[in-house]
Image: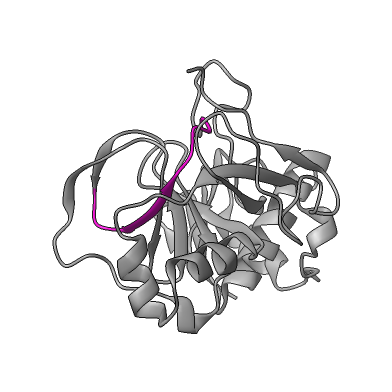
Amino acid sequence: MRPLPVGEHGLLIELDTAGETEALHAELLRRAADGTLPPVREIVPAARTVLLDGLADPRGLTAELATWDIPARTAGDRPGVEIPVRYDGPDLADVAALWGVTPDEVVRLHSGTEFHVAFCGFAPGFGYLTGLPEPLHVPRRDTPRTRVPAGAVALAGPYTGIYPRASPGGWQLIGTTDTVLWDPHREPAALLAPGTRVRFVPQDLPGTTVRERPGTASGALSGDTRRAEEAPR
């Protein structure tokens, strides 16, 4: 853990792994909630860093961090959400070729993985989900699309992501969901937050029943798990 000053009132904490980053972020939120963290305006996690902005005494917190015993997070202390997805993306066959499997096997492997949100960025509601093993990491497309539809489920590098709104993008599109990722009238507005566990549940076509598989059926995640709401049709 390497705390670095950012201006007069900021602290950027570098860590070695995504797991350490998630654990520190959870610990900071816990201490902020119970009043044992010095007042801070914002806590922002990324892939290997956590930024604290608006600290009155960054040096004091730097010294305090060295005394903390930060527990690793476990599946049971993360909230969970299931997201229905139609595996109908235009890059599904390309991803299958990169993995050396059939498109059906891509669906089985992806929906059989428990993901968690490492951090959020790019657009409101966009979460960077980790969980796929390294052999299943894929490159971005050589040529980005000028428009990716809202709800597109995509892969790039170690991450799975869901586009919360139509936008340009260069990730590999493997499916679509009607789940609303960002709703300013909802509290919280973002469905996904750092640390959230995510399971993708395959659907055949809009309006059909969910095709349940071992480990992916509703309620398969332990702890606080909920089925994501879909957008009105």
User: Residue shown at 48%/52% (left/top)?
Assistant: 10
Q: What is the x, y in percent for residue 146?
A: 15, 44
Report the quarter where the N terminus lies. bottom right
The question of residue 170 being in magenta is answered with yes
Q: Nearer the viewer, residue 185 or 203?
A: 203
The question of residue 158 being in magenta is answered with no
Q: What is the x, y in percent for residue 228?
A: 64, 35
Q: How is the image coloured?
A: one colour
Q: Quadrant of residue 109?
A: bottom right
Residue 130 at least partly seen = no
Q: Is residue 228 left or right of residue 148?
A: right
Residue 109 vs 232, above or below: the answer is below
User: Residue shown at 71%/47% (left/top)?
Assistant: 29
Residue 90 vs 22, above or below: the answer is above
Q: What is the x, y in percent for residue 98?
A: 35, 78
Residue 220 at least partly seen = yes
The segment highlighted magenta reads 169-180
Q: Nearer the viewer, residue 178 or 21?
A: 178
Counting labels gives 0
Q: Nearer the viewer, residue 78 or 34?
A: 78
